[in-house]
């Protein structure tokens, strides 16, 4: 049954609590390999970008904290050498404080800046990263104008969600979910204009929505999570299994030559008309649509933002199957959730981290 | 992997925004057959209960509104004849206003008191029930002391969730979900101490979490919703199918004699050791556990409250299989959600409706 809805979706201006709109800040996207950083303006533009290695192998959390401080230093050196640049922060000539925000993989206690645990940083348990980073920032060679301070920290996917909310596909919406399709499948939930953390900072694990209860095993140990179908590794495994089972595909030549497939290779084959590659993306879209049906019934969001490398497969290969599955399954009103591609791409992490600094989540 | 968690669940006092703690109010639980009403004290005690027929067949929404007013009148007559009763409302001698709250099945626009649509009231579309009820209340024979006014209205399951939150199993929690296992499977979501409505008032449809994507058809048209396994009708259908397929059970005698089974009969057979009946409840618990795994990963609630007639099957038959499935599937931290039986039973609807009056959701 399709119902007529008299009220259009409630598309109101989002809340931007505690955000001083004139400030610039520094966003840090902490990864297992690299630290990406940049200066972010109040309208979400990034300048003075730097990338430094994380060096997680060579030391513990304090070494990583010093690498984060180094990234901040390099950003500020760029800022200072670009005097008169329109992106220059409006630093107070006395205090010269500039806020830094950090998105980190793992389970992050946003209020205290503690890394409870992170799959990217083996052995880290309840690491007070904010303390280490601020200590490392304090030890920096004196910078001409600026005193950087870590003011906000969250899980990397929550940071990306915040970036999309304030400066990306989520602008104008209050209630939304975000999915990032990368190696794993991350998620974020926005309730009434704020990222929702749940009772123990683990809300938004949308990649672990169950889509096939007796299905593929997920890295988390559960069977049939969305991630077990839509994560990059899992998409490759699924096509490999079908090739091994004798399905014909233009990709067989590559795999027979020992090349490990990537989602990009599968997407390119699909775009060139390869039936098996098209089928793999259609299945991926179907499972995302099943997860979004559950999510839409539970949360009734206005939009679902889908980003990450796999989302680059695009409208025809991925987004159309997602919408078809949702439309087939969801009740009329929750099923009106708009499925949109993320706008900020790889910049969402830096932009969102800078928003964390503006929000000043750390006490 | 099981992680040690240093922080216990955040069990803080809930917010009770706008609630005047000294007030009594009248709660109305509107059903397709009966209207249940009572006077509810600020600590959630019900007195002066009445039940009147809904009379939905004999007229339209205005007839139902007059039946609701009649229920209110009967409650107030009982109040007035019980002078000196400890539950007597503290009415102001001048205005004598007393708040009324209403829980109604269907999609309710809580802010405006409109029934957008309701499966129990065929043909109702965008009915301004609050206007009709207040008109009917104004037409009541003058009551000695009280002027009742409809101040709050919501979906019946949201009302029950509010009742459990303030006076039942949810006391002391801010972030929770509630499932009611009846003819259908209803749900409610509490975020930061308030029932969450989503962008178009349909949040909390937990019964339509997908648990088996190619599974049983649900009344909503989707395949494999939780309701298609855990609704009363569906539980009966599932055992009937197995009996027809030749599975032996002590219930076969009854079905062969033409008796239609009920969940209570199945529960009694299970309690007496019938293997098939036990299996049916274990399967039901398994599917509830699958849905709660998704919900726990999405929302990370502190507790999940499970009520409704089917929940009477109890710990061994139903709650243990739910917890076992959740424990097997969920990641450590979200999996710590407590699974508890609702405390208020059939009273949750009246108590929650009275809370709606105290919250004064209608503008």
Image (spheres, coloured by chain):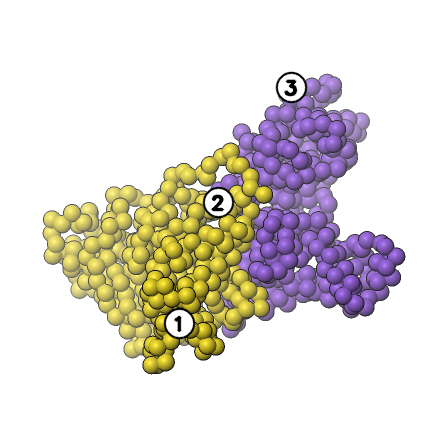
Chain colours: A yellow, B purple
Q: CA distance from mark 1 to mark 2?
A: 36 Å
Q: Are marks 1 and 2 on the same chain?
A: yes
Is B148 on the left or on the right of B245, as rendered? left
Residue at 51 percent across and 60 percent down: it is A209
Q: CA distance from mark 3 to mark 1?
A: 83 Å
Q: Nearer the viewer, residue B313 or A289?
A: A289
Q: Is residue B170 left or right of residue A17?
A: right
Q: Position of residue A144 (x, y in %)?
A: 14, 57
Whether residue B88 sits left or right of residue A228 in the image: it is right
Q: Circle 3 is placed at which residue position?
A: B94
Proximity of marks 1 and 2: CB atoms separated by less than 8 Å: no
Which SS class for mark 3?
A: loop
Residue annotated with mark 2: A336
| Residue at the image position 30 percent from the left and 44 percent from the top | A20
Q: Chain of mark 2?
A: A
Residue A361 seen in this snapshot: no
* Residue B69 x/y as whole percent: 71, 27
Which residue is at 63% across, 38% downward? B118
Residue drawn at x 65%, y 31% is: B100
First along the sequence among labels 1 and 2: 1
Q: Is residue B68 above or below residue A173?
A: above
Disc number lying in front (3 or 2): 2
Compared to B264, does B154 lie above or below? above
Circle 2 sits in a helix, a strand or a loop, which is it?
A: helix
Q: Residue B214 is drawn in which quadrant?
A: bottom right
Q: Secondary structure at mark 1?
A: loop
* Front in this rendered view, residue B357 or A187: A187
Return the residue nearer the eye: A194 or A339. Answer: A339
Q: Which mark is residue A249?
A: 1
In depth, the one of B90 and B339 nearer the eye is: B339
């Amino acid at each position: 049954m399709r119902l007529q809805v008299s009220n259009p979706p409630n598309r109101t201006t989002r809340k931007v609590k505690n955000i001083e709109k004139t400030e610039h800040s520094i966003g840090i996207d902490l990864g297992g390999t690299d630290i990406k950083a940049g200066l972010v303006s109040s309208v979400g533009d990034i300048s003075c970008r730097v990338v430094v290695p994380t060096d997680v192998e060579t030391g513990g959390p304090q070494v990583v904290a010093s690498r984060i401080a180094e990234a901040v230093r390099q950003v500020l050196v760029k800022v200072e050498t670009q005097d008169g640049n329109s992106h220059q922060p409006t630093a107070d000539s006395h205090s010269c404080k500039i806020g830094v925000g950090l998105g980190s993989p793992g389970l992050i206690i946003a209020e205290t800046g503690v890394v409870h645990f992170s799959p990217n940083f083996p052995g880290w348990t309840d690491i007070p990263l904010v303390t280490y980073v601020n200590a490392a920032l304090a030890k920096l060679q004196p910078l001409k104008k600026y005193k950087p301070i870590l003011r906000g920290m969250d899980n990397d996917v929550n940071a990306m969600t915040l970036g999309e909310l304030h400066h990306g596909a989520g602008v104008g919406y209050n209630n939304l979910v975000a999915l990032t399709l990368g190696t794993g499948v991350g998620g974020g939930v926005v309730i009434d204009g704020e990222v929702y953390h749940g009772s123990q900072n683990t809300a938004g694990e949308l990649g672990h929505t169950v889509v096939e209860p007796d299905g593929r095993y997920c890295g988390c140990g559960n069977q049939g999570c969305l991630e077990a179908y839509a994560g990059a590794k899992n998409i490759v495994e699924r096509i490999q299994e079908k090739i091994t089972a004798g399905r014909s595909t233009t990709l067989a030549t590559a795999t027979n030559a020992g090349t490990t497939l990537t989602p990009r290779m599968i997407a390119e084959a699909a775009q060139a008309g390869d039936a098996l590659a098209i089928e793999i993306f259609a299945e991926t879209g179907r499972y995302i649509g099943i997860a979004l049906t559950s999510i839409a019934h539970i949360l009734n969001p206005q939009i679902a933002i889908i980003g990450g490398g796999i989302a680059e497969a695009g409208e025809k290969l991925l987004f159309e199957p997602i919408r078809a599955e949702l439309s087939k399954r969801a009740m009329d009103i929750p099923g009106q959730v708009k499925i949109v591609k993320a706008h900020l791409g790889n910049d969402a992490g830096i932009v969102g981290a800078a928003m964390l600094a503006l929000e000043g989540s750390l006490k």
